[in-house]
Amino acid sequence: MHDYQHHWKDGTPIHLPLGKIVCIGRNYAEHARELNNPIPDEPLLFIKPATAAMHITRPLNPPRDRGSVHFETELAVLIGRPLSSASEEDARDAILGYGLALDLTLRDVQAKLKDQGHPWERAKAFDGACPLSPFVAAEKLAKDHLEFTLDINRERRQSGDTRHMLTPIVPLICHISQHFSLLPGDVVLTGTPAGVGKLEPGQRLSLELEDALFVETTVV
Ligand code: ZN
């Protein structure tokens, strides 16, 4: 059942509806290379529906009957104001908080869809395909770049630094808003760094954003 709601790190609910999760593919060159994908000239966008969201601390239980399931650790941006064809200033002001997300992907399904030139929703939009952490207020992370990590069973698997994004956060939000509106409560996932891999039963995932946020979850 879909019962996701945004929260701040201290557990307080954020009373904004999650409308959609807008994602970017291949925003870190090294990740594009590890999957043998060309680097796109403009952001490659796709959307996960609100029904894909779940609280990341709940055990992850992705579909097991459709081939491999990959984790992609991503910085999540919570939008706080409506944006349509936004300026960089408006986009910056609209960032309400930062969190971490897993862009769970049925990689074999996606490979087949890519070959056929079909959309990716079957691979990336299933229920539970977007575990989301609580959010940290944007003003508490007012730095010129943000770093985040994923450890699995205490071993470092992914390290992200927003300095390495091909399209940085604010231009990305502007770009999205040229094509469709963002509304308060929407979330933007900003792409995964290299190191993606398979989710396996029993894994324990630990995600950290700067020294501001630490969350753990397990795989059923
Ligand atoms: Zn992704």
Image: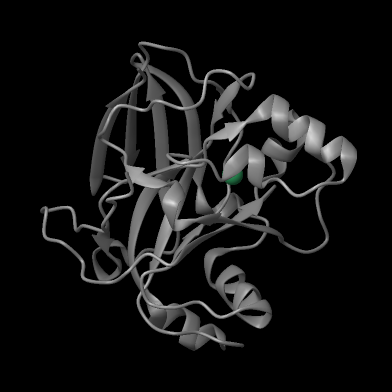
Q: Report whether 165 appears left or right of 135.
A: right
Closer-to-camera residue (175/14): 14
x and y percentages locating residue 46 in the rendered image:
65, 57
Q: Please say if 35 is above or below 48.
A: above
Dividing the picture into quadrants, the one containing residue 79 is: bottom left
Q: Quadrant of the N terminus?
A: top left
Judging depth in this view, the residue of 163 and 152 nearest the camera is 152
Quarter holding the C terminus? top left
Q: How many marks?
A: 0
* In-image side of 166 versus 169 (left or right): right
Residue 196 is situated, as x and y percent measured from the top left of the image, at 58, 28
Farthest-out residue, right = 116
Residue 119 location, x and y as percent?
A: 75, 49
Q: Is residue 156 left or right of residue 34?
A: left
In terms of image quarters, where does ligand 1 lie? top right
Q: Along the horizontal axis of the image, is 214 left or right of 61?
A: left
